[in-house]
Amino acid sequence: MWNRGEFGKTIINNSALHDPWSQTGNPATPFDQPFYLILNVAVGGTNGYFPDKVGNKPWGDASLTAPLEFWNATNQWGPTWGPPEERGMTVKSVKMYSQGACGAPPS
């Protein structure tokens, strides 16, 4: 998908995806400093990752009521989610490594 230190330079649905760390000169950026890792399941975005008018998307990125439009289309997308006990995200494990000596956590 991406090479270490390089995120794709792509335009999707008129939204530019760029690497905000490309000018640091450090190929480990942004992982060269403490950070929080967030894992989540997200739906209904308006950031251009899901192009308008593709795949029966029931909202438009420019819509001010995109979450409502998504919810109102529950009959369309709901059956594709499977039974409740199989929905969501399962994370088996997460491993994070720090190169060099590991000290106390950042304050």
Image (tube, helix red, strand yellow):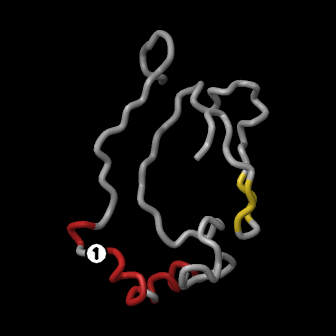
Residue at (57% x, 30% y) in the render: 31
Which residue sits furthest top? 101
Residue at (71% x, 54% y) in the render: 17
Circle 1 residues within 10 Å: few <14, some 14–19, many ≥20: few
Against 38, residue 57 (above or below) is below
How many labels, in total?
Answer: 1
Residue at (65% x, 67% y) in the render: 48
The reply, left or right, for residue 48 in relation to residue 67 is right
Residue 87: horizontal and vertical position, in percent?
Answer: 29, 67
Residue 69: horizontal and vertical position, in percent?
Answer: 52, 86
Three-letter amino acid code at the position of disc 1: Gly
Q: Quadrant of residue 21?
A: top right
Residue at (36% x, 82% y) in the render: 78
Question: Mark 1 sits on what residue?
Answer: 82
The reply, left or right, for residue 82 in relation to residue 51 is left
The reply, left or right, for residue 90 in relation to residue 39 is left
Q: Nearer the viewer, residue 97 or 54?
A: 54
Residue 6: horizontal and vertical position, in percent?
Answer: 68, 38
Residue 83: horizontal and vertical position, in percent?
Answer: 23, 75
Against 101, residue 23 (above or below) is below
Q: Quadrant of residue 88?
A: bottom left
